[in-house]
Image (cartoon, rainbow, N blue to C red):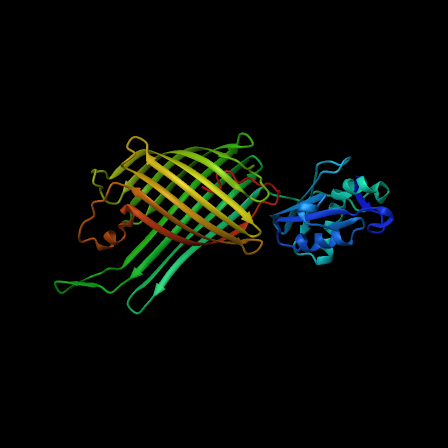
Amino acid sequence: MPSPTAAAAPPLRGGAGLEPLRVALECQDAGRTKACPAFLLAQIESTPLLMPAPRAAAQVVLYVTAAPIANRDRLHLRFVGELSGAPSSVEVDVDLDTRASDDQQRAQLRPAFLRGLALYVATIAPDAVKIEILRPTTEVTRPDTTPWGVNVEIEGAGSWTDGYKSATTSTTALLYRLDASSRYTLELTGSGGLTRRPPLVVDAREVSLDTNEWSLGASMYANWNVSADWAVATSAWASRMDPKGQLRSQLGVNAGVEWDLFPSDDPRGNVLAVANFLTLRRDALNFVNELGQSTAVYGFDRLSIVGKVRRDRATLGLNLGLGFEVLHPSRRYNLTMAPSISWQLGDHVDVEVSFELGARGVPVPVIPDDDLEAQGRASYAEPLFAEGQLTLKLHFDPTNGERNNRFENL
């Protein structure tokens, strides 16, 4: 099947009264290769009738954004210019193999670079551009891709002294299917922790202050894009906890709607979203609360505002949330602020540091005075809280090239 290529003829730079085309390079997301700025700047400097220029003096500005897809970086080249006889913008995508050599990556990048600039060069020197349609030398085959992906997130903390020891860990595993308009997710979670402390001696009797905690959970989730800005979602979950924690078990279902200023496949992953979820929960409590409840069934509404901006391999985020029990807002509520920063360390590894500050209200549990372990773990009933978290994320993304970040940041 024919494929178009574009090449520039070799007139001398600035010769015969011709002024070189001034090109500015803007690397919005450099990706995992040297394409921006190194390779592209070299292409500008070595191509006849082109010269690098600052943005204020440029006739054409080349914006470059990279999106990782498995072992490839998909570069989105957007050429923007104001030259008579040329389009105001030209957009070209090219895939670079991140494992290839520098020379191989330059060869992959060169045709897309020339194709994007050809119409602009032609406005100042029509005879300097030659366009041909050639028959490919090899059969073009579509690579096998999959919409399925897997994520594994691992968190942990610990301390060790002669008398005091503690360790906590949690793991989340997700299997999901992603395309441009929907996402379906199955999630399994597990966590555990322990502390070892010197016993308390009361009336010549040792009382243990050791704690052991664990929890297990499973959830199903789906979301659908209904327009460029709006999406809807629903989920259901179940969890089980140890006998000394806040809950013995929890069941829940919810439905939500989200509006995002940016498209769901924004190449840089930018987010400025407002979302609202309405939830129906059933909590089985380990300890009867001050309302006399051992089981509570209630509706809960949560409003979230999320912002994320990415630069190179780092992403800064901020999540603001307000939630409350539908019929009794003062009985159960939370108000939170959670800044975060994450880094892409490699093709399949991310690290995130996040903090959460907030205020909350829950019916206070009635815990026996002699149950020291449960008393020591009742921080969930404190009205003010601050938490920090370090997360290691292992991900194997779908290879179908689709991006869809709706509800992903809540």
380 relative to 409 in the view: left or right:
left
Q: Residue, x 56% and y 34% (percent of image)? A: 181
Q: Quadrant of residue 333?
A: top left
309 relative to 2 in the view: left or right:
left
Q: Quadrant of residue 249?
A: top left
Q: Does residue 140 show up?
A: no
Q: Residue, x 49% and y 35% (percent of image)? A: 223
316 relative to 133 in the view: left or right:
left
Give the percent coordinates (x, y) of residue 182: 54, 35
104 relative to 264 in the view: left or right:
right
Give the percent coordinates (x, y) of residue 34: 66, 55
Asked if 163 appears above or below 330 in the picture, the reply is: below
Q: Residue, x 67% and y 53% (percent of image)? A: 37
Q: Residue, x 42% and y 32% (percent of image)? A: 255
Give the percent coordinates (x, y) of residue 376: 25, 54
Q: Quadrant of the N terminus?
A: top right
Asked if 162 appears above or below 293 in the picture, the reply is: below
Q: Quadrant of the C terminus?
A: top left
Give the percent coordinates (x, y) of residue 373: 24, 54
